[in-house]
Image (cartoon, grey):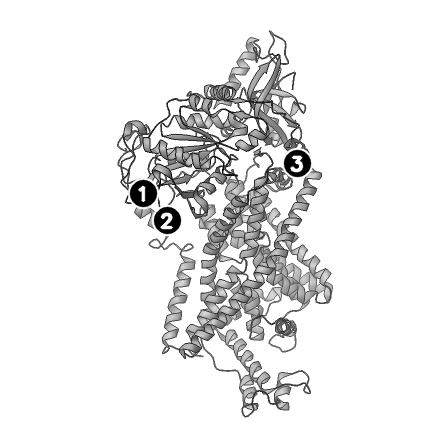
Amino acid sequence: MAMNSSSVESVESVESGEPGAPSDPSCACTGGKACPTVSLCGLRPGQGGVIASADLAADDASLLAAMGLAVGSRVVMCRVGEPCIVAVVSGITAHEGTESCRCASRIGLARPLASKIQVTPLTQS
Amino acid sequence: MSIPYQDWQFWATTLLALGAAAYLLRNVLPVPYFSRRARARRQEKPAKLTVSAKKPE
Amino acid sequence: MSESVPLIRGTQGLTTDARGQAGSIDHSTSDERLLARVALLGNPNTGKTTLFNRLTGLTHKTSNFPGTTLDARTGRVTTRGADAGVYIDLIDLPGVYSLELRQPEADVARSVLNGELAPAGIKAQVPDGILIVLDATNLGRNLVMVGEALRRRLPTVVAVNMIDLAEKRGLRVDTGALCSELGCPVLAISARSGRGVQDLVDTLARTLRAETVPTRTAPGTDIELRAWAERVVVSATSGPSESVGRTFSDRADLVLTHPVLGFTVFALVMTGLFGAIFTLAQYPMGWIEQLFSQLGGAVDWVWSLGGWEHGLMHDLLKDGVIAGVGSTVVFLPQICLLFFLISLLEDTGYLARAAFVMDRALRPFGLPGHAFVPLLSSHACALPGIMSARCIPDSRERLATILVAPFMTCSARLPVYVLLTGLLFKDSPWLGGAAFVGCYALGILAGMFSALLVRRTILRGSTRPMALELPSYKLPSMRNALATTIERGLMFVKKAGTAILAICIVLWWLGSFPKVGAPQQSTELRQSVSTLADNDAAPIEARRQLGGDTTAQVTAGDVRARADRMEHAYAKGESFLGVIGRSVQPVFAPLGYDWQLTVGVVASFAAREVFVSTMSVVIAGEEEGDDEARNQTLRQTLASATRSDGVTPIFTPATSWSLLVFYVLAMQCLPTLVVTAREAGHAKWALLQLGWMTLVAYAGALAAYHIAGALLS
């Protein structure tokens, strides 16, 4: 489903040297280079990220995507460890260089699952 | 030792006990006629049309 | 679940999913007051259940979707105003994150919307409309499913629920903007308080009458759909940013999911839960026992009114039917209390966190964190516990949970524990209490190791790591808790009650025939007092025959009562049940059981709760009643009862330990076996459960008998 096909897209974009999220002003990478990704567990509490890929079976990936953890979804780390709790944020608007989100849901993930999800970290929370 | 065959209450209570035993065993033993699954299967009717109003294959 | 959902096909041709093109709503029902059938759809944790309960009251029906183990709830919504007098049939679909997922809940939701499936007893047809429930505080994800539903081109109404929670956070939802984006009516409601619910019903009725389909549609691909949902959220909401990581829920989660603090809180909550259940339930349980004892008296009264002799029908009614119904209903307070409290806990949002805490403890045994609710519920009764294993997504994990759930000490085992710990520790109640707790622990350990074994052998597979939405903490809804309690209570009474009633009738028959004459000892006792009135002092020979102090005050009435009990015990021993017990006794001899104990054990293989009453009758010739002093005497009689040699006590310490361990571990509940077969999908799983638990119980009891015998001799 979406996660696996987009993970292929993100691999291709890495190979071509294009930024993973070129229009994202808070992306941690500099322009012209591919955004490094970390596993979801690698985010610090309060740090945001954009889901880049997930190394999961198709059924698991599509369930997580339906729960909100789809490629391109914006997440904020709430609790690192076991379980890993992330907030999936939506209704994101930018105002005077600051982003805000209107809605968020919390998803708890066992660590083995969280470690298989790659995110592009964002500089600002 | 005796079984009170002449007492009508013996037959009444025995029938009730047999009914109770049959009720208990119907989900365990394969008694097709009485099983709920078999009854449900008998009540199913074939569809005349599928979604999109086509005839089933 | 890998099994496909068999279809209950409608007898009419299925219309296309473009209902607007297919024509008018099917009014070919015999009930002209039925306006339409509507499917209630929504993500989990959107308050769909709360809305369903509010719309349908407590009169909804629970069945299942044929071919699945998923609950199907249907209810009736009464309309008012221009549509007064008509009603809408509401089908509560399982909560799903997406209609396109490959999982049983989504399969069922899709099939119902396609008109291919319906709850048992209802004709399958494409619903006349859809009512979607959204969480106002989480619109982004919820709107994805709205987009999927809009493609169905059915009359649709959207309810934005939890609007009160959103307003508390300062979030404003513009229902007008949502309405123009989605092309269908959108209303803001709070199902918990009832705000906006009546307007929702009116709007739904109007939309269904007019058969208005949505004027907009959502994009087809997942990525476009998500982007569309995000755009709609931005355009239809306003307010301050959500302070992620700093809300009350986030701070509470740091504690409640902490490996040490979280577990401590969990242990305290569970202690409180069980403490409340056992403390509060004893009052209604006492009332129920009194009520059934009065009912027995009422049977005697009816018979005396009719001038009939106390024959077999009287005995069946009193000792079979009333005892049977009573022995089920007496557990109802504990079961209802457990489900009431679990429902309240679940509504607060705590259980999702507890599932993660337990996931750490259960995963080494191959079980997921989700399994803790079924295992917890099984401590009241395995029947509803096994049925609640439906919440476990992975089929192997669900099956493993079902197989081991009966190891958890259920309410029916408690009278046996009370009897045996009372015999073992009559002078030290603290040790008796510790043994009680030990029984619970033994059951849990046996269950966990059995799960580990099963997951390493026949149900091999790695435990799926958990991913669970953590809903916001909120005050629980009494209405939901009551609705769940009534539903589960009725389910228990119907499923267990009918089976246990049938068991008691069969056991009564086996214990009543063949009829035997009185034993010689009781005949001699009667002869010795044949010329005396009840209040006269009994002769010395009679007192000598009874044993005990010959100088004690014993009346002729006491002697006759003792003769009655002897005949009763003798009759039970010579009945078909006694014959079965005697023939099977060699199997149980290594565990230290004589034929009388074997009769009790064999009888309780159908239902554990009959052990104490069977033993009481077989040994003492009578059962416990209301008179506590008499019950004490009865227990003393059991404690001092001897085997056939007239010397060795029946309940030696070693035998009592062996019995205790046997009852902790054995599968002795026919209703549970039936439900296991149904939930697991095949009788072979129930037979495996019976075989394995019997083996474990036998081995455990054998070890306990020999160890206790060696240590205590």
- The residue labelled by disc 1 is C33
- The disc, 1 or 3, on the residue closer to the chain's N-terminal end is 1
Residue at position x 63%, y 78% in the image: C646
Q: CA distance from mark 1 to mark 2?
A: 32 Å
Figure disc tally: 3
Which chain letter goes with mark 1?
C
- The residue labelled by disc 2 is B37
Answer above or below: position of C228 versus B2. above
SS category of the residue bearing label 2 = helix
- Viewer-nearest of discs 1 and 2: 1
Position of C8 compared to C271: left or right?
left
Q: Are marks 1 and 2 on the same chain?
A: no
- The residue labelled by disc 3 is C257
Residue C84 visible in the snapshot: yes
Residue at position x 49%, y 36% in the image: C195
Answer above or below: position of C596 versus A30. below
Question: What residue type is disc 2 on?
Answer: Arg
Question: What residue type is disc 1 on?
Answer: Arg
